[in-house]
Amino acid sequence: MAGIKKFIENAGWPRIIIGLFLFSLFIMAPFVRVRIDASVSDTLVRFGMNGVMVLAMVPMIVSGCGLNFGLPLGIIAGLLGAVTSIEIGIPGIPGVLIAMTISLPIAVVLGWGYGLLLNRVKGSEMMIATYVGFSSVAFMCIMWLVLPYKSSNMVWGYAGKGLRTTIAVEGFWHQAISDIGSFSIGQFFYVPTGMFLFFALLCWFMWVFMRTRTGTAMTTVGSNPEYARASGVNIDRMRTLSVILSTVLGAIGIIVYQQSFGFVQLYMGPFYMAFPAVSAILIGGASVHRASILNVIIGTLLFQGILTMTPSVINSMIQTDMSEVIRIIVSNGMILYALTRTVKVK
Amino acid sequence: MALEPLLNVRGISKSFNHNKVLKNVSFSLEKGKILGLVGENGAGKSTLMNILFGMTVIHETGGYEGTISIEGKKVRFASPFDALEAGIGMVHQEFSLIPGFTVTENIVLNRESTKYNFLVEAYGDRMKTLDRDDMDRRSREAIDKLKVGLDPAIAVSELPVGYKQFTEIAREIDKENTKILVLDEPTATLTESEAEILLDTMKRLAALGISIIFISHRLQEIMDVCDKIIVLRDGEVVDNTTPDETDIMSIATSMVGRDITTAFAGKGDREGNLGEVILQVEHLWVDMPGETVRDVSFQVREREIFGIGGLAGQGKLGITNGIMGMFPAGGSVFFLEGPIRLNDPTSPLEAGISAVYEDRRGVGLLMEEPISWNIIFTSLQMQERFLKPILGGLIKIRDESEIARSARDYIDMLNIKCLSENQRVQDLSGGNQQKVCLAKAFETKPRLLFVSEPTRGIDVGAKRMVLEALRKYNDEFGTTIVMVSSELEELRSICDRIAIIDSGRIAGILPASAPSTDFGVLMLGIDGREKKVV
Amino acid sequence: MNKKVDLLKHYLIQNAVPILFIVVSAFAIPISQFSGTYLVQEMLVRLSRNSFLVLSLLIPIMAGMGLNFGMVLGAMAGQIGLIFMSDWSVVGVPGVILAAIISTPLAIALGWLTGTILNLAKGREMVTSFILGFFMNGVYQLVVLYGFGSVVPMTNPAMVLSRGFGIRNVTNLEGIRKCLDNLMPLNIHGIDIPLATFLIIGLFCLFVLWFRGTKLGQDMRAVGQDMKVAGDAGIPVERTRLIAIIISTVLACYGQIIFLQNIGTMNTYNSHEQAGMFAIASLLVGGASVSRASIFNVFLGVVLFHLMFVVSPMAGKYLIGEAQLGEYFRVFVSYGIISLALVLHAWRRQKDRERARRSLRGAVEE
């Protein structure tokens, strides 16, 4: 009994409810003739697609900058890399690598500026991050119209200029990473091995980084900035570094997402993309100022599991698509829970 | 029959976790009189006032013994509001004012004059409209009683500190039933002329029939205005007298108290042991809020234990924080011949200076991290120890087993009571947390160690452990120690020499064996050299 | 002389945002080729339509709770009132009043919820109320899209989706369209002035002014400036904050009803989302900050923000030949202006904190 209590305390009610909900969806699936193998496969694919963007939350949370609602900034860097790569037109893995190479410096510069800004507004990072994300997406809407991209695969046919809202990566690098060593079992079960390996690699990098001298200092800055300063750590530099890391991971994350999804979504596409990532890591057990790689993995699995299962199972049960509503309630409810719980004791 | 005193305090005792901070304190205060309350930091003054004012912290820690009666009626306050109700007004050291409000609005805060309107019927009293004219009248009345030139319409944020104080006093006066006014160190932040006005005001209020309890470290002020003087030491009333029967020197003596002849027992031949000058501080100033250091110069010899004492707020804590780069500072500091870059925390750490800070929770510890991490972080960061190479030396990551081993060593050595080295620091008691702070400083293997208030807020047993650990460390490794403490006896029991800081300056440096009255004289700034803050 | 320059500088910095907007508009209006009459008419309509929503933000700012992003909850309550009203086919002014009566208790309940949650998240009210808006949007959809017509009976089949439950994407409010605006028709030189609506807005402004002079208003100001001092003085801090949010939510609910009666149709699932953002952006454009806002800021903000809103697509079209560009530009400006205001506020607060720390220093010595 005490063991159960402790488990509940550690995991927190929302996580348990969400876990049980997902579990019951899997139990119900066969009864409403939803294929378990297809569902699991879907969940896995979405897990791989979104994992990196959730991982992008970690550096900023541990350094005390809070939940990175400004993820769209990193996404924009990734999008710029992606469309430039398509403009160049090299297919396959090299195409993806070009996209990443181009987006990297952009993400570093954007992240650096964003980090400097957040250092000036300590204590209000999250609200400002949200609106920095929103404004940068809105600004890029203008840029997508005027940037001089020419590839006929990307611009509006009738005007000959201005990028389209969605651009297919089919024929360039659709599933380029996913398909490395991928395999299918039967008709419905597909495993994007390459994408998992790539995600695992990034997780491992993060794991190692968090154990280096710099990574340790970053965590300490988040835990108690004054302690870190007394131990000779430059607080602002660590925070900026964490923001740059988050932004770079956001850029890589969106490229991984696109190569699996098959489309580059421009304009208002990245607008709300921070929210699923934020709620995923919170569902995984992170709080506003603590996060681990395990939180990323568990959270992404649970969150994407629900996103995959609710449309199929609930729709088959009540013949209505409630998935969108459930997604909104679960993801924002989780963020709300985290915000009201962890009033920092200082 | 003598008139029943307005306030009668009988046999008050109070302990925090078996630590007796007040022992059988009794005094009385008659209507229209001023009572001066003096004592060192930690003598129990604040606890006594907290009891009188019904602060909730007293209840949460198990209440108190003894009785308090006002006008012959026994009272026991459950909250500050009860105390207010009974007519006790208190002006704290920290102002309780709304910065954007005018003086008037602050004086009548939450007791505004209001007028009725019909919406009150539907929505209750809070819909009453404010009667600004009456509020102005009341604030003017209160200010007039003080006889100070305070403009009721000006915003408090625009006022100089002294006038903020007057605003608070005016608020207490405006409360119709205020009978007793407690002023906690009201002159500490005032200029001399402001202080004089305040003292005049106090006399005037007393003449109006308000009794005042006046807490101050400036003994001359106490002598000037008080009718009665109570001296507290270690939670006991050691002197209950009047200004006519005493003088500043004897108050100072009874404040500082007993002469411990056993100061630094077994000191033996320390003198021969000491080495060359290792730390040289010249004209140091530090801009630390509440602990400003103005101009401090001193030298410390190798293997010495150097004490820095003085009353709270005089700047002794600023010295450590300034040298360690935690607050803006100037002047020059030389360590082992080389200069220390001020305002850069890495510089002293690189040179081999470490510090245990007075603010354990704020600066000293990572409350939410394990003990082991707390102990090794500074060494890992500054000296790149506890790292092991991976990927053929490409990257270095934390060596967890080495970290755990080191942490366990300290847990054994300092007898830190915990479940394991992975326990979070926030779950430890204050004394054990302090030991973790020490372990952190020891682990950097410093040549010189600053220790600020190492025994503040920890129990007697842990206190002894901490002091012994420091002494032992000094003996065994020859580490020079600079210890900052409010407790003079503690300094005298361990240090070779002690500097006393007053108003941000060194009032004097004495050997620890000097009689304690000499220290008292320095602390209170009464050795003839009138110390003025203009 | 120098002091005057300083004062001017201070004034310019304080009002940088509205001045910037006036300058941009001064360039954009001629380019857009709109006539003066058209713009005046348009501004009057938008003032009558939006002012009330913006006014609802004032009281939480007074209570130190920042921009109440939770006002969308009030807007949702108003919309639910309107759905019932159209379902029962009540038209005209009685319809508006009915909608207000239905939605008031709902708005109070939602305001209470918001206030309670914000009391749990002191110090980060804005981001919390912002996320709360998103969260309740989900709940709103759950109720309106699935609950109405199934759990809650609907009499008018035209409002319900063909599947038998859930309200359609667009709710027709033709029955109350402009009923308030046209209650007291006034036409000066071909410009319609919605007098009745302005009267309501005017009355409400008087209420705000009067409210500032009440005990409750004074308490809110005190709580807004320093919760601890206010609490020590015996002001019930949490309750005061709760009341501020409830008032704001109820007013936002009425504001949304006024807004939608002017438009005449309701985007069942989107109208409320925009209400919050536009109201907040307008207020900030008017020169308000997160901690200070006046009635003047409200009206100036509504005019300037909507001027840009009307003018920028056409200006974009004539300037670059792309109306879409102007469209995106105004979206960017809405978000950009909120970001800017938030950054300035947070920056100033950080500076103030540092200054406050400095003032703790001992008396200054000669």
Image: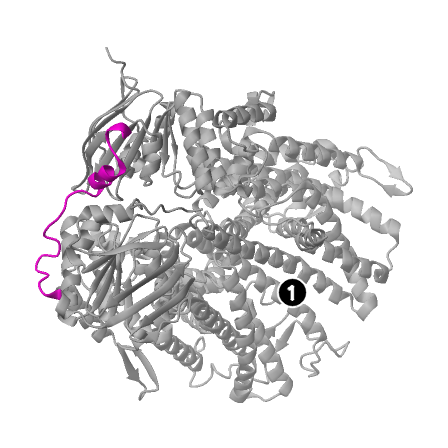
Q: Residue at x 67, y 68 (%)?
A: A141
Q: Secondary structure at mark 1?
A: helix
Give the side of residue C126 with respect to residue C296, left or right: left
Q: Residue furthest front?
A: B528
Q: Residue at x 37, y 57 (%)?
A: A15
The answer to which quarter of the image holds residue B336 is bottom left
Q: Against C259, is C199 above or below? A: above
Give the position of the N terminus of chain B as an image quadrant: top left
Q: What is the tally of numbered marks visible in this picture?
A: 1
Name the spot of residue B322 as percent of width and height, x first: 37, 62
Residue at the outermost right position: C189
Part of the protein shown in magenta: B242-270
Residue B57 visible within the image: yes
On the rendered structure, is A53 left or right of B448? Answer: right
Let me know if residue B256 is in the magenta part. yes
Whether the magenta-drawn stretch holds residue C293 is answered as no
Q: Classify mark 1: residues with Cα within 10 Å, few (<14), some (14-19) or many (20+).
A: many
- C357 vs B112: above or below: below
Q: Chain of mark 1?
A: A
User: Which colour assignment does the render follow?
Assistant: one colour
The amino acid marked with disc number 1 is Ala
- Left or right relative to B238: residue A152: right
The x and y percentages for residue B207 are 40, 21
Decide which of B502, B26 is in the foreground and name it: B502
Estimate the x, y position of residue C153 in percent, counting from the top left. Answer: 58, 39
Q: x, y percentage for residue C254?
A: 65, 38
* Res B427 quadrant in image: bottom left
Q: Kindly identify which residue carries mark 1.
A: A138
Residue A297 visible here: no
